[in-house]
Amino acid sequence: MQIEVPRADPQSVRLLQLSRRVNDIPRQSAILGLDESGLPLILRLSSPEVAHVLIAGTTGSGKTALARSMALSLAMHNRLGEVQMLFIDPKRNGFVPFVKPGGGGGLPHLLRPVVDNVHQAVFLLGEMVTEMVRRDHQNITEPRLIIFIDEVADLMEQGGKAMDRLMTRLTQRGRSAGLHIVACTQKPLAATIGSLTRSNFPVRLVGSVASSDDARTAAGIGGTGAEKLLGRGDFLLVAKGQTTRFQAAYVSQAEIKQVVEQLQTRHRTSRHWLESTQAEEPQQLAPTGTDGQIAQPAPRRRKGLGMMFGHQLRLIK
């Protein structure tokens, strides 16, 4: 029997603070947050067992905020020759902090301006399919191209067969060419996303959902208990049939803009530049029962997940 006790003093998990305290983050890895034992959870996108990531949850679950944290952590800890990114944002507010008003400048790792309509998205993904084929022929995998898509179900519905065909090709063959998709959606239904596309997301990050049926659809397996999650960054990582509960790292829009400016002007050579970043007032943490400390005895390393989480889950000291 497992009993979860809410924290008496909930606190947020701040991405920038977490980044300063975690050493030796593997290349092409994204910081997700803290697991229930207080260990930082790191997802290595270049792992053969990761490939593409589906982030699912209702409004208020924190899926877009988690995607922002993943994108910023990738930019902070990887050079342009290691990682480049593309943003598809139909809502026109998910990835706004990464670009300057008017489209001039922004995150150095951003390969194209943010795409905010379905026609541009179809064209962009067509370009990525062409790039995938070119890389396959030339045996190229770097820099890793990571495509972040907000509200992918709406995009698939509006884009029709053309969008479905492009997404299916990218999710089936993209990983071997160094292309990865991180897609957010409220309901990952086969009717809207497509069964072939959905089956090619081996890693799921599932936030709060409305029912056990929605939880099964989002996670791809039953019995995860995702319908009991508390929202505001309370997530499950589902991979290889195993689940890990974690509190997603949060970064504010003001912090994103400040880090983007520093990346533009200082061209990071170490993590020391993070020290000058000022944090805003923390948001409350979803009361998951995690107190940020390692429980006794020390947690076991999860078998079979080491390749996805870099070298291992690391203790924040």
Image (cartoon, rainbow, N blue to C red):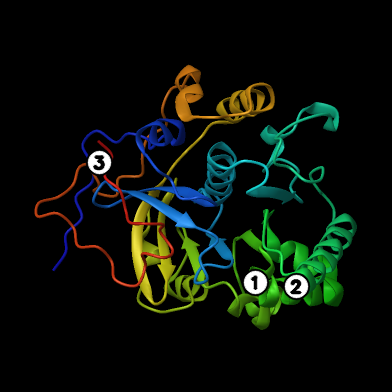
The numbered mark, 1 or 3, whose residue comes first in the sequence reads 1
Quadrant of residue 153 within the rendered picture: bottom right
Q: For the point 63% across and 69% down, which residue is it?
A: 175
Q: Does 75 sit left or right of 20 as displayed?
A: right
Task: Report the front residue among 239 and 150.
Answer: 239
Disc sitting over residue 176 in the figure:
1
Identify the amino acid type marked 1: Ser
Q: Is residue 312 depicted above or below 191 in this figure?
A: above
Disc sitting over residue 228 in the figure:
none
Q: For the point 81% across and 70% down, which residue is it?
A: 163
* Residue at the outermost left position: 297
Q: For the point 69% across and 48% down, which residue is it?
A: 84
Task: Report the front residue among 65 and 313.
Answer: 313
The numbered mark, 1 or 2, whose residue comes first in the sequence reads 2
Q: Is residue 240 depicted above or below 258 in this figure?
A: below
- C-alpha separation, residue under disc 1 versus residue under disc 3: 36 Å
Identify the amino acid type marked 2: Asp
- State the image coordinates of residue 93 (x, y, percent, origin top left): 71, 40
- Circle 1 crowding by C-alpha within 10 Å: few under 14, some 14–19, many from 20: some
Task: Report the front residue among 284 and 184.
Answer: 184
Residue occupied by mark 2: 136
- The C terminus: image quadrant: top left
Residue occupied by mark 3: 292
Q: Nearer the viewer, mark 1 or mark 3?
A: 1
- C-alpha separation, residue under disc 1 versus residue under disc 2: 8 Å
Q: Does 263 sit left or right of 101 as displayed?
A: left
Q: For the point 28% across and 66% down, which residue is it?
A: 302
Contact? badges 1 and 2 (CB < 8 Å) = yes
- State the image coordinates of residue 25 (x, y, percent, origin top left): 43, 45
- Circle 2 crowding by C-alpha within 10 Å: few under 14, some 14–19, many from 20: some
